Amino acid sequence: MAGKLGSSSRPLRVAVVGAGPSGFYAAGALLQQKEIHVSIDIFDRLPTPYGLVRYGVAPDHQKIKSVTKVYERTVADSRVRYFGNVGLGEEISHDELKSHYDQIIYATGASSDKQLEIPGEELTGSFSATEFVAWYNGHPDFADRDFDLSVESVAVVGVGNVAMDVTRILAKSYAELAETDIADYALEKLRTSRVKRIHVVARRGPVQAKFTNPEIKELGELAEADVIIHLADLILDPASAASLESDRTAARNLETMQELAQRGATGKPKQIHFHFLRSPVELTGDVAVQSMRLEVNELHPTETGYIACDGIGSFETLDVGLVFRSIGYRSAPIPGVPFYEKWGIIPNEKGRVTATHKGEVVPGEYVVGWAKRGPTGVIGTNKPDAVETVQQMLADVQTIPPVADEKADPKAILALLQGRGVDYFTFEDWLKLETIENERGKAEGRPRVKFTSEAEMLAAVRVEG
Ligand code: NAP
């Protein structure tokens, strides 16, 4: 071997699969440590980097997106390269990655979603929030989705921040949306939307809502939509009231909901109705959804302190023509990589991939972010999460079998991709595309106008030369 693994003559070769926040934080943590020399390649199946920052964070939350400046600094380091448009299991196989990199980090996020598992869920007009979010954010895989916004009444199931994003985008006026980087086709479709009532359905009570304070406050500031919350729904059971003492977010959420309930309808053209203690049990309609049957729930605290809900056998019906279930994401399995179906994650111990749940460690393979811990937390949560994984990687350097020197040569992977005719996107390509998007945005007073097709992204950059 050219030198000890992790020395300057034989740096540790690391592949990061997925260029979202968790992948960049993992690369950043590897660069920051001083013990081991590293050389990192970041891959993404799309040409564009930044994962959920580009395709998940709401288009009207631009401040959150400025976190990409940190990721730009990471990839500007000479020890890091970016390969967009290179998908694991597509342009490159798991075995090929294994033979070229001493360590692999999966930062593949959670691209799939949970199902309600109720009759009628397959009807036309029943969607996951994931699809709608990816569509309005211009994700190339979702650009051709069609949502019938000619209906007047829509249900959003779940009360997390994703549900709030979907509700807000449906409720905003054209003028409010037109200053964002929402995909052009989505802006046009929402311009002619006839949606007037958005029903937000929560299976538990207001104190158990998962949204955070700014998100519920924002609903109260919309130009064209009133929030309708019944004051009676905010009268708390003893367990919920007690839980407020140790949960400031829930206490503040409740204050905001009390203000909104007192304000009531002010005559705006759209209404956001909150329905607490209601679980969807069936969607009905001939081909398309026409209504949602709900069972009324009651809360009961469990031994662990969790406040659960149970149906009481009393039912109601909501007439709705579209349903977005916003009840959580799941990771999708990757060929050749272990997957724990029950939790929808890559099984791991503090980031070391294991062959099965609580099984043997798979040497040289690691995981970060939502694929590691499930779909929880904000972007910043991925930073300490990545540090934890990188600590395991560093501890393993002297015990893992290094790949052959000729494969570890950074030129080897280039030869493989070029030999296969893969039109990969470098970071310079991305910066060119970003400049074009930003210029198109400037012309319209928007942060950027996104390219939403991979072919157009590649063509735009290749034409620019
Ligand atoms: P989430 O916060 O876990 O919310 C999921 C919601 O779905 C909860 O209200 C949950 O209710 C409900 N739910 C789950 N299973 C259900 C079922 N079978 N029937 C009815 N309701 C069900 O997930 P998320 O909204 O997808 O967000 C994922 C993560 O991204 C969160 O950490 C979130 O904060 C973050 N995020 C942050 C922002 C932001 O910072 N602005 C924006 C978007 C997302 P229970 O509580 O009863 O389980």
Image (spheres, rainbow, N blue to C red):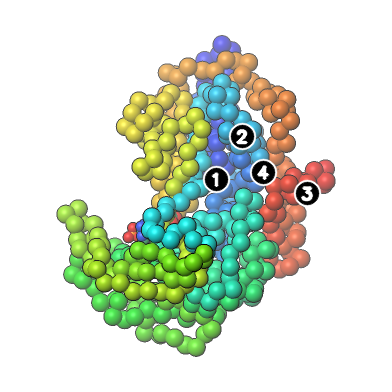
Element assignment for label 3: helix
Q: Residue at x 69, y 28 (%)?
A: 417
Image height of 255 relative to 368, above or below? below
Q: Is residue 28 visible?
A: no
| Residue at mark 3 | 460
C-alpha gap between disc 3 and disc 1: 23 Å
| Residue at mark 2 | 90
C-alpha gap between disc 3 and disc 2: 23 Å
Element assignment for label 4: loop
Q: Nearer the viewer, mark 2 or mark 4?
A: 2
Q: Which amino acid, by three-letter code, is at mark 4?
A: Pro
Q: Residue at x 40, y 85 (%)?
A: 263
C-alpha gap between disc 2 and disc 1: 18 Å
| Residue at mark 1 | 20
C-alpha gap between disc 2 and disc 4: 14 Å
Classify 10 Å Cα crowding around label 3: few (below 14), some (14-19), many (20 and above).
some
Q: Nearer the viewer, mark 3 or mark 2?
A: 2
| Residue at mark 4 | 47
Q: Residue furthest bottom?
A: 267
Classify 10 Å Cα crowding around label 1: few (below 14), some (14-19), many (20 and above).
many
